[in-house]
Image (spheres, rainbow, N blue to C red):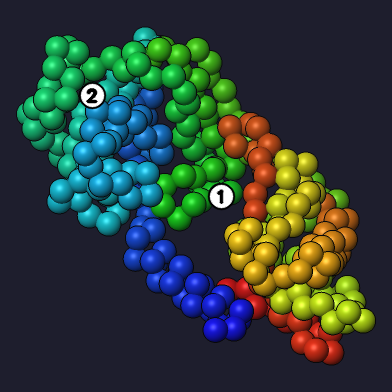
């Protein structure tokens, strides 16, 4: 089987399984002041997985529970409340129950009692075991979304929690828009921008090295291309490429892209890096084509 056919099969299988399994997930909720806000922090799930992770089937790191739908793998939604700078769990509801406008408080109370026992007091549980963050949007602009659950909003509020107590409350802007840099809001367009830059390079070479391959291009915390790697395992690279050809392709890609400067994306106020997938095809005459799906 040729290298190209193998890559096509892998891409088709990846696309098929992703379309079936990577369903957008319903969020949990946190009551903060007078607002009930969607949050994408799996606080209760972390606790449940510590209890029964060895006995339950895992799917993308979430517990797939009996009767769960594809957009609610956990089989429940949790509602939290910040009260007196403390984090409480106040409800465990069926998927979509809050959206339908009515919560079965009796059923919710039974679920919490079965999990937390005597920790349930006055209809709520103090989440004293949790250290981490609760973040929720301050606007509707989404900068990054993993297609399932994790979301970065352009503006968000972040609560830093220690032993269930709110230590800090901060508002963050997660996108630095620099008119001198390349706009990075729409991740789906970045591979096309990379390709336009690669198209200017001369790919025909005297050694007839073939750089037709899938790559991951890393845009780092500073908004510059810091790394290029093939989307292959070390074993596949050893099988398909000799060292000179491999080095030529990586160096060619890196050199062609190194002058690009993108806007900076942050998560909870901290700059992040991300990998951009790109697939190219080089014809014998050196003409490059964009095969990125």
| Nearer-N-terminus badge (2/1) | 2
Looking at the image, which residue is at 19% across and 37% down? 93
Residue that sits furthest to the right in the current view: 206
Point out residue 220 in the picture as x, y percentages from the top left corner.
Answer: 73, 45
SS type, badge 2: strand
Looking at the image, which residue is at 26% across and 36% down? 54
Residue bearing the label numbered 2: 90
Looking at the image, which residue is at 79% across and 64% down? 243
Report the front residue among 43 and 209.
209
Q: Is residue 108 left or right of residue 137?
A: left
Displayed quadrant of residue 3: bottom right
Point out residue 88 in the picture as x, y percentages from the top left corner.
Answer: 30, 19
Q: Is residue 51 above or below residue 202?
A: above
Residue 17 visible to an observer of this rendering: yes
Report the front residue among 232 and 47.
232
Q: Is residue 233 above or below residue 221?
A: below
Report the front residue among 68 and 182.
68
Displayed quadrant of residue 70: bottom left
Point out residue 189 in the picture as x, y percentages from the top left corner.
Answer: 66, 65
- Image quarter in which the N terminus is found: bottom right
Q: Is residue 26 left or right of residue 69?
A: right
Circle 2 residues within 10 Å: few <14, some 14–19, many ≥20: many
Residue 181 visible to an observer of this rendering: no
How much space separates mark 2 and mark 1, taking CA atoms? 29 Å
Q: Is residue 130 above or below residue 147?
A: above
Residue bearing the label numbered 1: 144
Per the rendering, the mark at residue 95 is none
SS type, badge 1: strand
Circle 1 residues within 10 Å: few <14, some 14–19, many ≥20: some
């Amino acid at each position: 089987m040729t290298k190209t056919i193998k890559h096509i099969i892998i891409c088709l299988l990846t696309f098929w399984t992703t379309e079936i399994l990577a369903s957008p997930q319903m969020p949990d909720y946190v009551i903060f002041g007078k607002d009930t806000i969607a949050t994408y922090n799996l606080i209760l799930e972390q606790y449940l997985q510590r209890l029964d992770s060895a006995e339950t089937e895992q799917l993308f790191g979430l517990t797939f529970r009996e009767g769960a739908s594809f957009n609610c793998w956990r089989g429940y939604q949790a509602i939290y409340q910040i009260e007196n700078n403390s984090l409480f769990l106040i409800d465990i509801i069926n998927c979509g129950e809050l959206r339908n406008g009515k919560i079965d408080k009796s059923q919710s109370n039974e679920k919490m009692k079965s999990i937390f026992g005597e920790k349930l007091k006055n209809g709520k549980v103090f989440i004293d075991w949790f250290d981490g963050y609760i973040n929720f949007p301050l606007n509707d602009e989404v900068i990054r979304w993993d297609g399932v659950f994790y979301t970065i909003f352009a503006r968000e509020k972040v609560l830093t929690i220690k032993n269930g107590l709110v230590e800090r409350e901060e508002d963050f802007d997660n996108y630095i828009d620099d008119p001198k840099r390349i706009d990075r809001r729409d991740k789906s367009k970045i591979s096309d921008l990379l390709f336009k830059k690669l198209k200017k390079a001369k790919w025909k070479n005297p050694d007839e090295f073939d750089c037709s391959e899938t790559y991951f291009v890393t845009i780092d915390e500073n908004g510059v291309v810091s790394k290029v790697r093939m989307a292959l395992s070390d074993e596949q690279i050893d099988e398909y490429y000799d060292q000179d050809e491999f080095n030529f392709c990586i160096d060619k890609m890196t050199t062609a892209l190194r002058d690009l400067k993108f806007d900076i994306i942050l998560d909870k106020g901290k700059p992040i890096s991300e990998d951009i997938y790109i697939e190219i095809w080089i014809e014998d005459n050196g003409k490059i084509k964009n095969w990125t799906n």
